[in-house]
Image: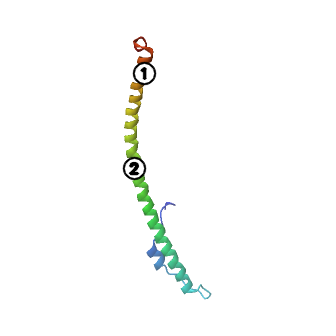
């Protein structure tokens, strides 16, 4: 079994029966503690799912603007080069352009 794979779910924790012994633990205390664990476990599971969805949403969001930004940068670079070329022609005359 993979170390990243979850072994138990809340229902399995709730339904787990332990053998009793002569000097065993107080069953009510164990049950109360397991209830807390189950509650936390479910909250962690919900949080993981929420974060996974958020992660996917952000990955998609990053990919889309990058394409738009590259297009805008390309156009902006072209504009800057054209302005620079025109400025050089004005400052240095046609001799420089040829």
Q: Nearer the viewer, residue 51 or 69?
A: 69
Say whether disc 1 or disc 2 marks the residue closer to the N-terminus: 2
Q: Residue 14: where, in percent of width, then height?
A: 47, 78
In the displayed structure, 48 sits above or below 93; it is below
Question: Counting other residues with Cα less than 10 Å from the Cα at mark 1, is it few (<14), some (14-19), or many (20 or more)?
Answer: few
* Secondary structure type for disc 1: helix
The residue located at (40%, 40%) in the rendering is: 69
State the residue lying farthest toward the right.
23
Q: Residue 50: where, in percent of width, then height?
A: 43, 62
In the displayed structure, 23 sits above or below 63; it is below
Q: Residue 18: where, in percent of width, then height?
A: 53, 81
The residue located at (43%, 24%) in the rendering is: 84
Circle on res. 49: none
The C terminus is located in which quarter? top left
State the residue lying farthest toward the top.
95
User: How far apart are the two marked residues, 1 and 2, measured between alpha carbons?
Assistant: 39 Å
Pointer 1 residue: 87
The residue located at (37%, 37%) in the rendering is: 71
Circle on res. 61: 2
Q: Nearer the viewer, residue 39 or 75?
A: 75
């Amino acid at each position: 079994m993979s170390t990243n794979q979850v072994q138990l779910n809340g229902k399995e924790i709730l339904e787990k029966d332990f053998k009793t012994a002569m000097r065993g633990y107080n069953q009510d205390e164990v049950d109360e503690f397991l209830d807390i664990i189950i509650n936390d476990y479910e909250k962690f599971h919900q949080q993981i799912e929420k974060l996974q969805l958020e992660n996917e949403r952000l990955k998609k969001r990053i990919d889309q603007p990058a394409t738009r930004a590259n297009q805008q940068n390309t156009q902006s670079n072209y504009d800057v080069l054209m302005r620079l070329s025109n400025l050089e022609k004005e400052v240095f005359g046609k001799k420089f352009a040829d």
